[in-house]
Image (cartoon, rainbow, N blue to C red):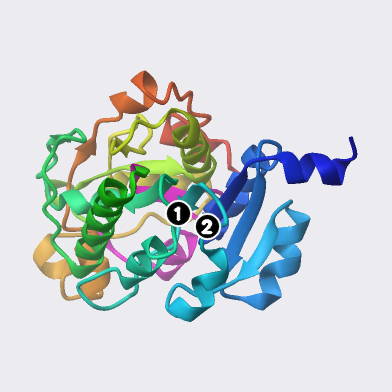
Amino acid sequence: MGARARAFGKPRLLVVGCGDVGMRLLPLLRGRFRVFAVTSQPQRCAQLRAAGAIPIVADLDRPASLKRLAGLAQRVVHLAPPPQQGALDVRTRNLTAILPEGAQVVYISTSGVYGDRGGAPTPETTPVAPRNARAARRVDAERVLRAWALAAGGRVAILRAPGIYARERLPLERLQRGTPALAPQDDVYTNHIHADDLALLAALALFRGRPGRVYNAADDTHMKMGDYFDLVADTFGLARPPRLPRAELAREVSPLLLSFMSESRRLENGRLRRELRARLRHPRLEAAVAAMKP
């Protein structure tokens, strides 16, 4: 049997929102699936083909462009973010309108849905309490997908990801600008996941995720945000950021940046081990960043 015939015999997988994490996901799945990757940018088609995917130009903001996706694949990895404005995730609504009955969906959400936990341990059973519109749109997307699964006999597994990092996704520009961080007495716990590990978890959730299940897609590190900035600064030979009390910092940074520095939680990730049987490639943030030293 030729390679083309074998490819056509594989089950189909649709990757929606094939950005950085999606590109890391493709090598993990292209041997098992005939992968279709949705992009709204025609200029990315060559890149997606080179990565082993079949590109489809479509836009979640334009429902008419999604018609060709209807019934295309029974397995879907949904990586697309919600719109930047509004109370609802209309993109996820548009996507569920073309999903086939009985489909299996893995959705990458955000740990921001938990809101501020004051540094408390945060398992997946913690009620959602979004404090900003970004997180509220993610909560809306999760609810839309659960409702779709119930109505269409589908399955959805939700990965709630914290701060995603990689060598290309470190706060180097922020450090070079000298943007201040919170003083230790006001600092917040932050959580992280390497982009490669998030791609791995998405792949595992396709095979091992339980229907309707939420997974905290976080590594094993519980670190204060300012300590993370210091770690990156020390690793790359940059000056550590100045530390300011919260009241002073609020006058120095944008409201968007301040919102990221106003929520503190320590994600528990036991389900990744027990149910997805995941072995993270980068379980400790300190070791992963140290290995990136130039």
Task: Count neighbours of disc 1 (C-alpha within 10 A) and say few if under 14, some if 14 to 19, many if 20 or more.
Answer: some
Q: Position of residue 37 (x, y in %)?
A: 61, 59
Q: Secondary structure at mark 1?
A: loop
Which of the marked residues, 2 or 1, is nearer the chain's N terminus?
Answer: 2
Query: The N terminus is located in which quarter?
Result: top right
Contact check, label 2 and label 1, Cβ < 8 Å: yes
Which residue is found at the position 25% from the left and 66% from the top?
Answer: 134
Name the residue carrying label 2. Answer: 71
Name the residue carrying label 1. Answer: 100
Amino acid under disc 2: Gly
In reply to whether residue 172 is colored magenta, the answer given is yes
Q: Position of residue 99 (x, y in %)?
A: 44, 57
Where is 144 relative to 117, above or below?
Answer: below
Task: Count neighbours of disc 2 (C-alpha within 10 A) and say few if under 14, some if 14 to 19, many if 20 or more.
Answer: few
Magenta-colored span: 156-181
Which residue is nearer to you in this view: 247 or 21?
A: 21
**Farthest residue, direction right:** 2
Which residue is found at the position 45% from the left and 54% from the top?
Answer: 100
* Drawn side of residue 265 relative to residue 48, left or right: left
Residue 41 shows in the view = yes
Q: Secondary structure at mark 2?
A: loop
Q: Position of residue 56 (x, y in %)?
A: 64, 67
Q: CA distance from mark 2 to mark 1?
A: 5 Å
Which residue is nearer to you in this view: 174 or 29?
A: 29
